[in-house]
Amino acid sequence: MGTPDFAVPALKAVHAAGHRIVAVYSQPPRAAGRGKKPRPGPVHKAAEELDLPVFTPKSLRNAEAQAEFARHEADVAVVAAYGLILPQAILDAPRLGCFNIHASLLPRWRGAAPIHRAVLAGDTKTGVTIMKMDAGLDTGDMALTVETPIGARDTTETLHDRLAQMGADLMVEALEKLAKGRLALTPQPEDSITYAAKIDKAEARIDWTRPAVEIERKIRGLSPFPGAWFEADGERVKAHMAMLIPPADAAPGTVLDHALTVQCGDGAIRFLSLQRAGKKTMDATEFQRGRPIAPGTVLR
């Protein structure tokens, strides 16, 4: 059960491990492109390539959907970024339960945006937790975890790809132990619980009065989506990577040089990659060859 790119490695890994996948559940195709024609999501497409049956109910709360799910007589459900709430009837249907791949070291960053929030908060490490699902928000007992450091140049994109593969490998290990009756479950600690709220587009705008370390983390944490942004001469620009630079004596948001060093509330940053609206991402040098942002410009 999954929908976006994050869940594709898990589907492929479980299939490659020789498990019999009786059904793949994914969110319904959504309108996309110029013609706004419905397009299946990444997991849906991957399942069709593997010649697996795909089910795309809009909800699992009704009796018909729940009965259809029960008819699969599954031993276990593997869940990764599915995007729909699983009611108790669904959680109870598989003989051994539903197991979720969660992209954090639970109980830190329960919720919708664990990868974004870990980078934004300046965490030095993150990881994946395999959890037996219950009716709460990422509150189920933990089965397996694996850690990875968050590097100084990691973005949400690089972490997403790394954690997706780590989660896939860990789920295969969990299923192997589950099949042998050797998968131990541990309740989550009651302390150190944090919640990863969904990213609000309103928080993507850069506030230049904030410290440079915070702004640099925001740029990495919101890359590639939704993208931290600012306005320069009335044009909206997204930033995807920056580095910390010693500050100058200037007002926050002031462009200090042709290399696109910008004064912050405390410290300064230098952009490394940016993206104009409707254009591809480019490095700062290439960006400045087109319509350069002049020193002295105050970014909003």
Image (cartoon, grey):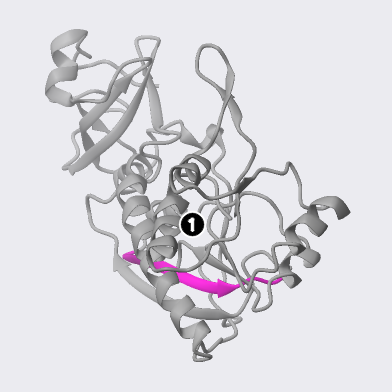
Please say if 117 is above or below 91.
above
Please say if 286 is above or below 152.
above
Q: Is residue 156 magenta?
A: no
Q: Residue at x 46, y 78 (%)?
A: 174
Q: Residue at x 60, y 80 (%)?
A: 141
Q: Between residue 257 and residue 55, name the one nearer to us.
A: 55
Residue that mark 1 sits on: 114
**Position of residue 34 in the picture relative to residue 300 (left or right):** right
Q: Residue at x 48, y 76 (%)?
A: 175
Dot 1 amino acid type:
Pro
Give the image quarter of residue 299.
top left
Query: Residue most toward the right?
Result: 63
Q: Between residue 204 and residue 137, name the one nearer to us.
A: 137
Q: Between residue 221 and residue 2, name the one nearer to us.
A: 2
Tag 1's secondary structure?
helix
Q: Main secondary structure of the magenta part?
A: strand
Q: Position of residue 152 (x, y in %)?
A: 22, 54
Q: Position of residue 126 (x, y in %)?
A: 37, 65
Q: Between residue 224 and residue 266, name the one nearer to us.
A: 224
Quadrant holding the C terminus: top left
Residue 106 in view here: no
Give the image quarter of residue 170.
bottom left
Q: Position of residue 226 (x, y in %)?
A: 45, 34
Q: Which residues are magenta?
A: 124-134
Q: Position of residue 18 (x, y in %)?
A: 42, 68
Q: Residue at x 47, y 71 (%)?
A: 129
Mark 1 crowd level (few <14, some 14–19, many ≥20, 10 Å Cα) = many
Please say if 38 is above or below 140.
above
Quadrant holding the N terminus: bottom right
Residue 243 in view here: yes
Query: Residue most toward the front?
Result: 51
Counting every numbered tag in the picture gives 1
